[in-house]
Image (tube, coloured by chain):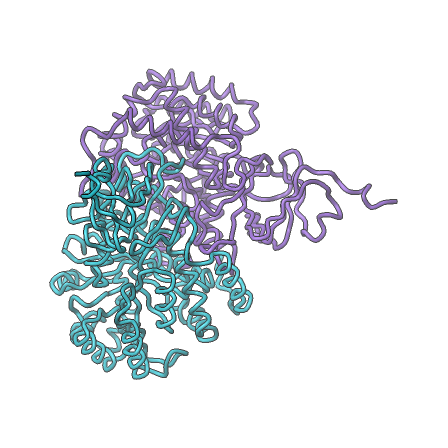
Chain colours: A purple, B cyan
């Protein structure tokens, strides 16, 4: 009998010198192949053996590091149209003096469509395969993500004040339920309930969100304790810290995705660990707004799941998860006063599997393991800025930039090929963004403080 | 009489929508042209008028920001061959346990030639046109920089212990004078005297260096007060802080380029300002080694000239001055607790004109002004990760990455054209680096601390 009869036909074989799995043991495999069938990683085998067991198109990547696609665990995609609109300002002034007024004037369906598509293009080219969003018109962003082939966790926003998306908490919640229903069966779109922050969403809607989250098993995605001033103001008004308020309402549980958390007391860290809360660290946004620094090393040591996000480009000003990983590692060492803190492996976990866990997607994505979706990036090392390679994980975190990403797959579909998008038109998106800038103009009061 | 008789023939005209001059007023010109003749910026005129006054080949860059070439004010170029050799370790252990042993075993003329050429390729592609180096075999790095067309400030290293470059301070100084002589008339190579650090160079050679620096008018490039431990050890051994020792020797003056300076008291900041000392901030290296943070905002407010460096790739792990600018701005805000501190304009100045000043090259490079060398980079904004553009300087610092650099000129010669090197062979350098990695292997004791 011929050997060929035992060979399995598959959709794609990817072979590379380094396969960074981000599994529970941080396994790095050398000279291995990923075997992909129906969008799923069916097998991982030594490249020397793959042809004995599988047939199908093979892409040999002789100089590449294969990693899980990166997960941006907190962002506001559409705000890409406000990239660099106002800089060098503290959070409160930036938000109330510039961003909220501009949003009030300009955000509509078209803004969200153009901004979020631009952000998807930027994300994919930089190796981000999944994002956790929070913005108005979440249905539009969800539909466009689905069309582009990206994986998306869509925040269904709730805020006390009226916006173009709704008149107040009741309408936001009604719309949240409707959007959640629309995407219930989309394999690549999941949703979160996304109250903006404890200071901007009252107790009553937060209680409804708590009930809904428990009933429907949907995560709650919220900004918490981003700045010292915010915490102080909250205590003045409510007599408790914001996190304590969330705990009273029953929101401090494994469904909570608490973003920023630059202000944390030891007892709060212990509570987060005990209750299985997920924290999303956004180091570049926090630094840029001088909001403080999330105590990442202390959280990781306490066993808290810490994911990583860029925040929106209006406060970053990019969606570069490579930069964010490096900044997380560097800042984590600085804050801990220990060069071995937040090491390269931990930074990579924060940008991959920890994000998947926070979004409730750990069975689907975040690592290269059998049975998971083929959400994969290929990082090229045959470049003057990546040579030589001693340790691939160190290289991904400390040396690679997003421009080293050559190929990207989501659920087995190649969305970036040779650094070019396959499902989005980069030139058209760039031109559209520039047209928005012409229309929006510069802020009435220039933010520059030189 | 024909108008054409009054037109001046020039070598090159570069026209762009944004010209970020980094002059004394931080002028940003819109729709202007740089007129280049014999490697010098001869004129800067509105693009609408340039053809009335000058003839010559014009490169119209319709979507680009033209900036001065970036100046990496502290690095160890050849160490590119040790990029990622040992990570996630504090300075002392990293240096004494890994880097110095590897250097002792492997550094020779070929290592320096291959490493520094790799570093030049990486630097140029990332928009760095000038570097301030400190390493062994400085003559080799100088010759190769000259051959590649880069601008280089070459540190003539002095250290107490013997290395492959010399038996001790006397030989290092002898060689320093010889190398200085060799490049006296090279228009693109200047030199510094480069004692490694107060803790690694004794008083006697430092006194000789002080005398030589004054006699020959050569800057002194030295690591100072990089970590708290170093300062404590120095006080224990010598009874004074390192900077005080340098002051006693007469080295605290406008020729001093003091690198790192993470440990500074208020009285020291005042002394640096009064004495016209230049400080080089290396934020990513300092963070990665958890060495502390240079108080940049306080230094700038005191009037100290602060330049920016990547340090070597063994502690960074790249030579990306765009990343370094962004990190300097972000960390500066964090350390100052003020989002308006170390703004985009200041960060760009640190990476350009302040570096030129520190190296004694402010008349030659560091800004786009008439009479200066045509050291220029063109940053492309027609990209999904750069659109839209509200404020070009904010974009260069907060949004751009080094891969947005499309063209680079040094002294009017184009060294990067469409993101490709014109004087160095990227593929050959990458392959050579990988051969070095094969030969060197991984450290005997893996540095990973997971």
* In front of the other: A285 or A423: A423
| Residue ID at (45%, 51%) | A400
> Does residue A42 appear left or right of residue B117 in this picture?
right
- Figure check: B105 above or below B4: below
The quadrant in which the N terminus of chain B is found is top left
In the rendered image, residue B303, in percent from the top left (x then y), is placed at: 14, 56
In the rendered image, residue A307, in percent from the top left (x then y), is placed at: 44, 42
- Figure check: A235 above or below A394: above
Q: Is residue B323 visible?
A: no
Q: Is residue A148 visible?
A: yes
- Figure check: A360 above or below A212: below
In the rendered image, residue A21, in percent from the top left (x then y), is placed at: 57, 48
Q: In the displayed orientation, state which residue is furthest to the right.
A: A1
* In front of the other: B121 or A83: B121
| Residue ID at (30%, 25%) | A103
| Residue ID at (52%, 48%) | A379
Q: How many marks?
A: 0
> Does residue A401 appear left or right of residue B191 in this picture?
right
């Amino acid at each position: 009998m011929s050997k060929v009869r035992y060979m399995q036909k598959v959709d794609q074989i990817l072979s590379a010198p380094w396969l960074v799995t981000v599994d529970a043991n941080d396994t790095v495999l050398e000279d291995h192949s990923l075997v992909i069938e129906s969008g799923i990683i069916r097998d991982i085998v030594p490249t020397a053996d793959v042809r004995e067991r599988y047939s199908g198109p093979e892409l040999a990547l002789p100089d590449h590091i294969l990693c899980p696609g990166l997960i941006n665990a907190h962002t506001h995609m559409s705000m890409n149209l406000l990239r660099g609109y106002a800089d060098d300002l503290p959070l409160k002034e930036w938000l109330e003096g510039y961003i909220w007024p501009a949003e009030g004037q300009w955000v509509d369906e078209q803004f969200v469509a153009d901004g979020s598509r631009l952000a998807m293009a930027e994300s994919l080219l930089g190796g981000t395969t999944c994002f956790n969003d929070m913005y108005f018109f979440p249905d539009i962003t969800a539909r466009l993500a689905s069309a582009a082939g990206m994986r998306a966790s869509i925040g269904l926003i709730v805020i006390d004040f009226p916006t173009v998306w709704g008149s107040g908490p009741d309408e936001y919640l009604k719309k949240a339920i409707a959007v959640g229903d629309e995407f219930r069966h989309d394999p690549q779109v999941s949703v979160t309930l996304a109250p903006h922050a404890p200071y901007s969403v009252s107790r009553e809607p937060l209680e409804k969100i708590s009930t809904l989250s428990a009933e429907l098993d949907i995560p709650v995605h919220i900004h918490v304790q981003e700045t010292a001033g915010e915490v102080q103001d909250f205590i003045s008004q409510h007599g408790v810290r914001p996190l304590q308020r969330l705990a009273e309402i029953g929101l401090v549980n494994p469904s909570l995705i608490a973003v920023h958390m630059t202000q944390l007391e030891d007892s709060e860290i212990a509570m987060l660990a005990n209750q299985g809360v997920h924290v999303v660290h956004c180091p570049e946004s926090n630094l840029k707004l001088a909001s403080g620094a999330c105590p990442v090393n202390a959280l990781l040591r306490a066993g808290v799941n810490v994911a990583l996000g860029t925040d929106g480009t209006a406060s970053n000003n990019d969606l570069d998860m490579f930069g964010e990983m490096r900044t997380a590692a560097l800042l984590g060492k600085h804050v801990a006063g220990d060069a071995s803190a937040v090491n390269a492996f931990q930074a990579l976990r924060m940008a991959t599997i920890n994000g998947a866990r926070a979004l409730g997607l750990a069975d689907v994505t975040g690592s290269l393991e059998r049975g998971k979706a083929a959400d994969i990036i290929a990082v090229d090392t045959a470049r003057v800025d990546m040579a030589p390679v001693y340790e691939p994980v160190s290289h991904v975190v400390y040396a690679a930039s997003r421009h080293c990403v050559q190929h990207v797959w989501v659920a087995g579909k190649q969305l970036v090929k040779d650094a070019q998008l396959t499902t989005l038109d980069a030139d058209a998106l760039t031109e559209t963004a520039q047209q928005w800038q012409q229309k929006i103009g510069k802020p009435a009061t220039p933010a520059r403080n030189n």
